[in-house]
Amino acid sequence: MDSRYGIANEYQGLAYAYEAAKASLDFVFSTERLEKVNGVSVIDNIASVKLLEKLGMKETHENLYDTNELISMRVNKLDV
């Protein structure tokens, strides 16, 4: 599963991204046989990194995309 999002400026900070991402995680963990979900963000996008952390994701320290500009994070099914 690949999920991406963008929030128009006037709707940023209203928790829409969190609500949608949390619902997606809940759905995937309850209906699919996935044990973990990865998240990736540009390191400088503080809001996106904080969103991933709020979802329970922890930094993996994996360089999945051969760049230092991205941060890779993961949440395990048992941690949510």
Image: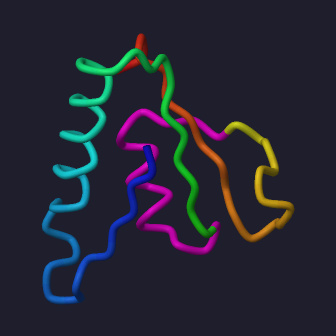
Provide residue 30's location: percent of width, then percent of height: 24, 18
Q: Quadrant of residue 74?
A: top right
At 32% from the left edge and 75% from the top edge, which residue is drawn?
A: 6
Which stretch did the figure color magenta? 43-59
Q: Residue furthest top?
A: 78
In the image, residue 22 above or below residue 48: above
| Magenta segment includes 47 | yes
Image check: 54 left or right of 9? Answer: right
Q: Report the side of 68 relative to 14 (left or right).
A: right
Seen at 52% across and 47% down, the residue is 39
- Residue 42's place in the image compared with 2, above or below, is below
| Coordinates of residue 33 in the picture (x, y in percent) | 40, 15
Residue 58 pos. (x, y %): 57, 35
**Where is residue 42 drawn, in percent x and y?**
61, 69
Quarter of the picture containing the N terminus is top left
Residue at point 36% right, 39% down?
55
Q: Seen from this angle, which residue lies furthest bottom? A: 9
- Whether residue 48 is in magenta: the answer is yes
Left or right for 71, reference 62: left
In the displayed structure, 78 sits above or below 28; it is above
Counting the numbered discs, the total is: 0
